[in-house]
Image: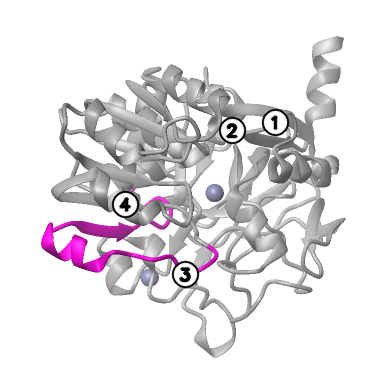
Amino acid sequence: MYSPPGVKTKHNDFPIPDRMRAWVLGDPGQLSFTEKPVPVPKKAEVLVRIDAVAICATDLEIIYHGPPASIQGGLPFNKNFTPGHEYMGRVVALGPGVDEYQIGQRVAVEIHAGCGQCKRCREGMYTSCHNYGLNYGDVDKGHRANGFTTDGGFCEYQVNNINTLVSIADEMSDEEGTLVVTAGTAMYALTELGGLVAGESVCVTGPGPIGLMAAAVAKALGAHPVILTGTRDNRLEIGRQLGADAVVNIRKTPDVVAEVKRLNGGKGVDYVVECSAATGAVNDAVRMVNRGGRVCLAAFAHEDVPVDVAHIVRNNIYLYGIRGEGKSATHRAEAFMRQKRFDATKIHTHTFPLDDLPTAIRYAKDRVEDAIKVVVKANMGAAQKEAAE
Ligand SMILES: [Zn+2]
Ligand SMILES: [Zn+2]
């Protein structure tokens, strides 16, 4: 029975085994299902029983290519590393001194705890921690970003710093709970980093999970109009249901810049959130935005992309990248979801048991059956069994 010194548990309600099932990354693209000890929370940490974990495009980057994961100062391969970062569950054990959360509480978890001591962490920009990945040997700054620099969520239990926890509403399903941080990332991009206020105009390019959540959050924040561009009608339709005032299929509308301006009364928009990673997307974005407007880059491009610097300079355009979910924006996103200001479950398409992670990854990677957000659940069999009895 799991009973590390100084750690509070309630085994009657939430029994915790000593060992758990966990996926680990071998060579690029190779995952194997194995066993690991259940991790132990330290000061200011809790143990979370993982009830659901969503697959993110960044997980695919890590599993097949490595970065942005950094384990022991290098690539994450063959280091007994467990990826996965978009998870939710229940607090089942408290580290020494923790009274901010109770055992049994349902939480979504932010990914980045940061080091807590560098300039950016002190500013609340812990996703841009200057000590990223430094949590080993004589450079141990205690940095944690689960699924990136420490073990993540493709397993049954994980430790999380209390600063990364977000209490979620009882009515929220496990699957919806995994989307709180995705919505929080969109919130961070638009408000904390972007400075959006109600009534400003927004165009989101690329209807992936972040793009769809950006459209939903922008609308809930009072942006107008909210325009979404993409190549797949089914995803654009979901964007419309989430709050986009207008959608543009760029396959049918080749001059997307002119169309976005037309939809905004002939003028460029105040914000573009670029989520497509298409080669021409940055130049399109800086031409869609009005003079003095802001372009948030939220997608990883694999090659160098051409950028019309002179246009950006002449037009006083702000260009900024977004990494994850800083400044506790996730809490405000959860408040929107709690109030049902948008229905994030519309982007969840498939759920698989944890043992079936490779199938789930294939669905997410190859967009099988128009998959958008694919979730895996450790106790799916049990839950189904309970429902059947
Ligand atoms: Zn993610
Ligand atoms: Zn830091």
> What amino acid type should be assigned to the residue bearing mark 3?
Asp
Check disc 3 and report the residue beneath it. 304
Look at 66% across and 27% down and name the residue there. 349
Which circle's residue, 3 or 1, is located before the other in the chain? Answer: 1
Is 254 placed above or below 64 here? above
The local crowd at label 2, few if under 14, some if 14 to 19, many if 20 or more residues have their Cα within 10 Å, is some
SS at badge 1: loop
For residue 119, above or below residue 154: below
The answer, for residue 38, to whether it is visible in the render is yes
- Whole-angstrom CA distance, mark 1 to mark 4, is 45 Å
Of callouts 2 and 1, the N-terminal one? 1
Q: Residue at position x 82%, y 16% from top?
A: 386
Q: Which residue is mark 1?
A: 13
Residue under circle 4?
296
Q: Is mark 1 within 8 Å of ligand 1?
A: no
Left or right: residue 76 versus residue 306 is: right
Nearer the observer, 122 or 208: 208
Res 16 quadrant in image? top right
